């Protein structure tokens, strides 16, 4: 009976999967255009934008037919993509930024997320899931962190879309602001790279902001950012445990361990051993980005602009507050770490 159910589920999912895959392919092609490559806009960002447009112009009957496949893409393909994302970094990356760099990343992550938890619901009146998703995206790695955190906090498609739009918007501002601040303050490449890598939202945005200054700054920024990305797995495990404890004992369910996050760490460990051929790693990275792009497209397709409009200006206000903290508070954390290291 179970195999029969699966045999019926596969055809039902095909329309949605094919639709999301087509939009993801289009986003990938557009992202490779020279002008957009220089802007730092990634295929993941474009996939959710194109999906959002399509999801609000396609007939309701077509979207209803695609619903089963979109659910598969937003859940299973997302998790697979996050696992493969682990091949993008190694534990040796930690050595390149040193303990001070790791401490800075951890301090920025914890302080930013704590600020989102504190202000999101109490000051800005946001639903808890929306506040947590904006906090995760701002403190770790943008849209990828939002998508990875959504299953843990049980965020709706609308919550995820609002959070992704917020972190992408302010991360894009950072790509322009940070290089200008670097030249104004005459920051050394390494100091600038650590600041950018520890505080800018998206990996692609960090790359763009780093290269806008120098190759040396970009190298340091990317390493600092990838160490921050590595913190996604323990963050998700801790968040899952926190959710379980916050539930009344009578209705408390077992801690939902995000196995895909552990898979992320496991593949990072395999990558650290340097036992995989570079060709295999490159193919796996390409596959991981493709899976995440399909998941992003599916998210956009399942999101209604009316629901995002109903969220109001509060998500934007929270995102702006967290962005200000990342720029100023993150800068202060970096200065303090630099002073301690020099002393």
Image (cartoon, grey):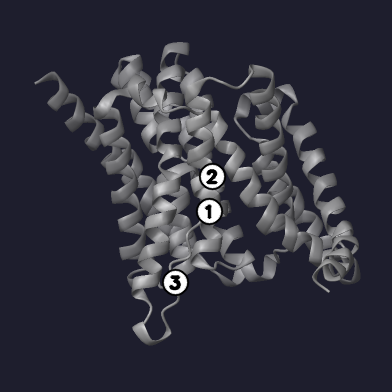
SS for callout 3: loop
User: Which residue in the structure is indicated by mark 3?
Assistant: 254
User: Which residue in the structure is indicated by mark 2?
Assistant: 263
Left or right of 42 in this view: 73: right
Left or right of 296 in this view: 254: left
SS for callout 2: helix
Above or below, comparing residue 44 to residue 217 in the picture = below
Seen from the viewer's position, the closer of residues 9 and 315 is 9
Q: Quadrant of the C terminus?
A: top left
What is the C-alpha distance between the residues marked 2 and 3?
Answer: 20 Å
Left or right of 163 in this view: 15: right
User: Which residue in the structure is indicated by mark 1?
Assistant: 259
Name the quadrant containing residue 88.
top right
User: Where does residue 300 sit, x and y in percent of width and height?
Assistant: 71, 56
Q: Residue at x 57, y 53 (%)?
A: 147
Q: Sort mark 2 into few (<14), some (14-19) or many (20+) by Cα contacts within 10 Å.
A: some
User: Where does residue 81 sit, x and y in percent of width and height?
Assistant: 64, 44
Q: Sort mark 3 into few (<14), some (14-19) or many (20+) by Cα contacts within 10 Å.
A: few
Q: Sort mark 1 into few (<14), some (14-19) or many (20+) by Cα contacts within 10 Å.
A: some
Name the quadrant containing residue 186.
top left
Residue 342 visible in image: yes
Seen from the viewer's position, the closer of residues 235 and 271 is 271
């Amino acid at each position: 009976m179970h195999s029969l159910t699966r045999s019926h589920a596969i055809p039902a999912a095909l329309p949605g999967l094919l639709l999301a895959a087509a939009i993801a392919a289009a986003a990938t092609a557009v992202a490779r255009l020279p002008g957009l490559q220089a802007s730092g806009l990634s295929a993941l960002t474009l996939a959710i934008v194109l999906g959002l447009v399509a999801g609000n112009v396609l007939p309701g009957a077509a979207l209803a037919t695609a619903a089963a496949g979109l659910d598969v893409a937003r859940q299973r393909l997302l998790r697979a993509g996050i696992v493969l994302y682990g091949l993008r970094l190694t534990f040796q990356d930690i050595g390149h930024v040193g303990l001070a760099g790791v401490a800075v990343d951890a301090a920025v992550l914890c302080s930013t997320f704590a600020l989102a938890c504190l202000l999101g619901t109490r000051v800005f009146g946001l639903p808890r899931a929306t506040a947590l998703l904006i906090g995760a995206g701002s403190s770790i790695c943008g849209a990828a962190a939002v998508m990875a955190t959504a299953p843990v906090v049980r965020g709706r498609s609308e919550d995820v879309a609002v959070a992704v739009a917020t972190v992408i918007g302010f991360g894009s501002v950072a790509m322009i602001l940070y290089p200008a601040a670097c030249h104004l303050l005459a920051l050394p490449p390494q100091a600038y790279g650590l600041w950018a890598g520890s505080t800018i939202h998206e990996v692609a945005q960090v790359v763009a902001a780093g290269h806008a200054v120098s190759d040396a700054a970009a190298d340091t920024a990317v390493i600092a950012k990838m160490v921050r990305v590595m913190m996604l797995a323990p963050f998700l495990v801790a968040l899952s445990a926190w959710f379980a404890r916050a539930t009344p004992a009578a209705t408390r369910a077992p801690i939902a361990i995000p196995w895909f996050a552990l898979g992320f760490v496991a593949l990072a460990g395999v990558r650290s051993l340097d036992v995989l051929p570079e060709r295999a790693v490159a193919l796996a990275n390409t596959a991981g980005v493709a899976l995440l792009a399909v998941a992003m497209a599916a998210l956009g397709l399942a999101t209604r602009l009316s629901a995002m409009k109903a969220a109001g200006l509060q998500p934007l206000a929270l995102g702006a507050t967290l962005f200000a903290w990342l720029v100023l508070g993150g800068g202060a954390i970096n200065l303090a770490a630099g002073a301690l290291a020099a002393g």
